[in-house]
DNA sequence: AAGGTCGGCAACCGCATGTAG
DNA sequence: CCTACATGCGGTTGCCGACCT
């Protein structure tokens, strides 16, 4: 069964908004709000626009207290940290940045921030293809990799870069390798080995010191002590691992060293610790069905109270 | 100066999700 | 519980100005 269109697309104006249209919408919204129905709104105020278009224009451009452009270093840090932790969930990221819209942040990430962080890197896809081989099912690894979530790969890459930066010793502590090893153990259902592996993971972190990670290793993301064996891997990595449905070939050391060279300008003393980012928070926020994302923007103070400093991206 | 290319950003598209009846 | 509909959201497109040749 097809969905009924929200408006007659052939008969509504599309494209850039005129100042008159903006004025009409802004005046009405400031006076009456949506009245709970965006679809009916354009007709009420004599705009030949789709209701969705009106909503987008209001939320992304006309709404009061919006900031455009000029992202601060602190905002960069927060965006980067959250992207690593939760991926491209722009509305949640926007909720942490008062006055910013999800669209703004998405555009900013895609056009600038991502390039700032990853732009000087070798093409990850090419790296993967260059070490392609066949698995036991005769399926080429390169085919598997093409199925990987791009954002998961980017996040894993960023995660590795930051870890490497924080402590060069973590060249021996390779998240990608950990993912691969753990998947191998899971596939083989070797519980004892999994236990040993996580114990070893904790030991390795303890040996290197907790400061090796910007992300807590001895607490889970809810800020509670670890009580099960599945918390030896940092939360971020766990998130990423969940997205890696197929095998992963770890980066070669030479590539990691290249990354270290590329990112040595990042000030590793300013590391953002997203320990407040619990699953509970995530679910609550994601399920909010607010008409106006400005409502969500009121929450950062509550949710960011445990912010420490962030990545410094120069 | 003219044409081509690129980057930034506003806006659109369509699927996912929530909810009222 | 089911259905229809409104809204939320992330990915994508296309316009436009800046820069390059």
Image: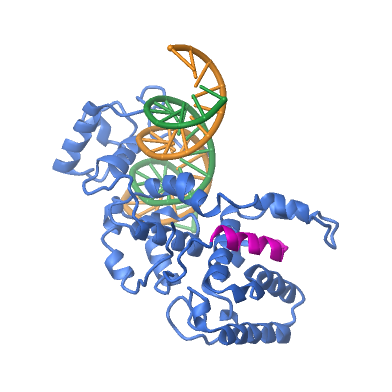
Chain colours: A blue, B orange, C green
Is residue A250 visible in the rendered structure shown here? no
Would you say A29 lies left or right of A159 here? left
Where is A21 relative to A109, above or below? Answer: above
Residue A253 in magenta stretch: yes
Q: Nearer the viewer, residue A160 or C19?
A: C19
Expressed as whole percent of the image width and height from the top left, the position of residue A244 reads 64, 62
Q: Quadrant of residue B9?
A: top left
Would you say A133 lies left or right of A191 here? right
Q: Quadrant of residue A136?
A: bottom right
Residue A160 in magenta stretch: no
Q: Quadrant of the C terminus of chain A?
A: bottom left
Where is A177 relative to A208, above or below? Answer: above
Q: Nearer the viewer, residue A253 or A83?
A: A253
Would you say A59 lies left or right of A177 here? left
Q: For the magenta stretch, what is the residue range?
A: A246-263
Q: Nearer the viewer, residue A308 or A223?
A: A308
Is residue A34 visible in the rendered structure shown here? yes
Expressed as whole percent of the image width and height from the top left, the position of residue A193 reads 73, 84
Expressed as whole percent of the image width and height from the top left, the position of residue A19 reads 23, 28
Q: Residue at x 48, y 74 (%)?
A: A215
Q: Residue at x 29, y 26 (%)?
A: A48
Expressed as whole percent of the image width and height from the top left, the position of residue A46 reads 22, 27
Q: How many numbered tags mark residues here?
A: 0
């Amino acid at each position: 069964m097809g969905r009924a269109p929200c408006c007659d697309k052939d008969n509504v104006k599309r494209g850039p908004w005129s100042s008159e249209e903006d004025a009409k919408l802004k005046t009405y919204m400031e006076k009456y709000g949506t009245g709970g129905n965006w679809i009916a709104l354009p007709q009420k105020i004599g705009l030949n626009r789709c209701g969705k278009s009106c909503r987008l224009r209001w939320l992304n451009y006309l709404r009061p207290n919006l900031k455009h452009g000029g992202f601060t270093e602190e905002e960069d840090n927060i965006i980067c940290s959250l992207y690593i932790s939760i991926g491209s969930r722009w509305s949640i990221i926007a909720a942490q940045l008062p006055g910013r819209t999800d669209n703004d942040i998405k555009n900013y990430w895609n056009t600038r921030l991502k390039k700032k962080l990853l732009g000087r890197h070798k093409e990850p896809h090419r790296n993967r293809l260059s070490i392609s081989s066949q698995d036991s099912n005769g399926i080429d690894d390169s085919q598997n990799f093409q199925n990987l979530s791009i954002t998961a790969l980017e996040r894993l890459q960023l995660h590795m870069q930051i870890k490497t930066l924080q402590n060069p010793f973590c060249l021996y502590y390779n998240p990608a390798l950990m993912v691969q090893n753990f998947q191998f153990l899971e596939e083989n259902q070797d519980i004892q080995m999994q236990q040993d592996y996580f114990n070893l993971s904790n030991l390795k972190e303890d040996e290197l010191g907790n400061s090796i990670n910007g992300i807590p290793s001895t607490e889970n993301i809810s800020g509670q002590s670890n009580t099960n064996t599945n918390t030896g891997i940092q939360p971020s990595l766990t998130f990423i691992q969940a997205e890696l449905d197929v095998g992963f070939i770890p980066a070669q050391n030479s590539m990691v060293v290249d990354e270290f060279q590329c990112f040595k300008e990042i000030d590793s003393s300013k590391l953002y610790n997203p320990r407040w980012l619990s699953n509970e928070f995530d679910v609550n926020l994601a399920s909010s069905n607010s008409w106006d994302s400005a409502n969500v923007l009121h929450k950062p103070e509550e949710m960011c109270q445990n912010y420490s400093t962030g990545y410094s991206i120069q």
